[in-house]
Image: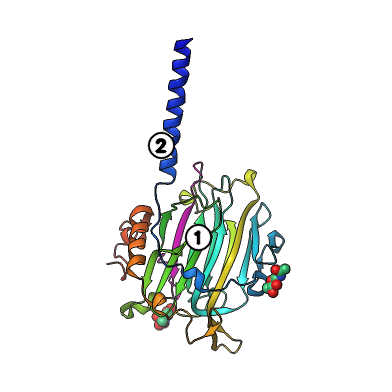
Amino acid sequence: MAFLQEKMLFRGLLIFCMALVVSSLKRPYTPPTVAHLTDYFPPVSIDKGFSNFFGGSNIRLLSNASMASLALDKSSGSGMVSKNRYYYGFFSAAIKLPSGLSPGVVVAFYLSNAETSPHNHDEIDIELLGHDKRNDWVLQTNIYANGSVSTGREEKFYFWFDPTEQHHQYSIIWNSHHIVFLVDNIPVREFPRNSGFSSVYPSKPMSIYATIWDGSEWATHGGKYPVNYKYAPFVVSFADMKLSGCILNPTEQVSSCSKAGVSSSDPVEGAEFVRLSEKQLEAMNWARRKLMFYSYCNDRSRFKVLPPECK
Ligand SMILES: *[C@@H]1O[C@H](CO)[C@@H](O)[C@H](O)[C@H]1NC(C)=O
Ligand SMILES: *[C@@H]1O[C@H](CO)[C@@H](O)[C@H](O)[C@H]1NC(C)=O
């Protein structure tokens, strides 16, 4: 009896210790505190800001169109596109990713002008890549400029939270100074505009897209794990969408710029948007040191000569 109790106590202790180790492995990081840039901009109503792009029957507007759920099932993925095109701005979405196994699933929040400039398009991408058995999502950022599709500029990160539990903010600053990718306002990547190689900088008006689709061929471990429709539908929630930029009017002129309702020549030219603060730089270094596991700038097997912006 005593032996049995001891054994059970030991087993209980072991399980407790293992749970402790697992939970500390799962959430090892506390993010630094930074300015909440997302608070500067009002959310747009999704029915006012966006149209259906594809898979309309898999799109549901919720909570008075402040939120939308987009599904991927065997028949189709789904996507929305901004009604306007923008030249520079601050673009953001609060996203809650599908729970459960999601290999091959891609959720994307991105800027592109592939529809209007098919041969020399620009793109600024936040892609969330579903993962295999351990159920870890990956954040991928990428930039194309002037049709440079043969030179992917990918960087990949793990999260410091479970992105399927609640909404987290994914944002893009794009202005004449730099492109910044932010997650919950923590900058994870800055791509400066450098006059020395301006051709690699997106510089034509773009539309904003929010999509979910089947990336079986490449998304998870280079395509090793395709979408398993046994777990479908995969449903992503978009909320708190911010589209604050200079809007291109139908005569192809950049016309209205508004920051929190105030007109200016560029909504993202204020000091907070022109360069990263010390705190933001610190936070970005933290994110890159702890969570970035791939950068094209370190990929010497892919590039004999690294792209010019890689120092
Ligand atoms: C729904 O959203 C619109 C803005 O698009 C707002 O004017 C209206 O008051 C909202 N209605 C409710 C019931 O919240
Ligand atoms: C874009 O690429 C084309 C060639 O495809 C080139 O002629 C043009 O100068 C480039 N534009 C910029 C801004 O670099």
| Depth order, front residue of 227/130 | 130
Q: What's the residue type where badge 1 is placed?
A: Glu
Q: Amino acid at mark 2?
A: Val
Magenta stretch: includes residue 261 = no
Image quadrant of ligand 1 equals bottom right
- The image quadrant where one finds the C terminus is bottom left
- Look at the numbered disc 1 and give the secondary structure of its residue: strand
The number of numbered badges drawn on the structure is 2
Q: In the rendered view, does 185 fall on the left or right side of 194?
A: right
Examine the structure image and report whether residue 140 is included in the region drawn in magenta. Answer: yes
Query: 170 or 9: nearer the eye?
Result: 9
Q: Residue at x 45, y 17 (%)?
A: 7
Q: Position of residue 134 (x, y in %)?
A: 49, 42
Residue at mark 1: 127
What residue is pinned by disc 2? 21
Residue furthest to the left in view is 311
The mark that comes first in sequence, 2 or 1, is: 2
Label 1 crowding class (10 Å Cα cut-off): few <14, some 14-19, many 20+? Answer: many
Near mark 2 (Cα within 10 A), the count class, few <14, some 14-19 or many ≥20, is few
The image quarter containing residue 150 is bottom left
Magenta stretch, residue numbers: 133-152
- Across and down, in percent, residue 131 comes to 50, 48
Q: For the residues marked 2 and 1, what is the alpha-carbon distance in whole angstroms?
A: 30 Å
What secondary structure is the stretch in magenta mostly built from? loop
Label 1 C-beta lies within 8 Å of the nearest ligand 2 atom: no
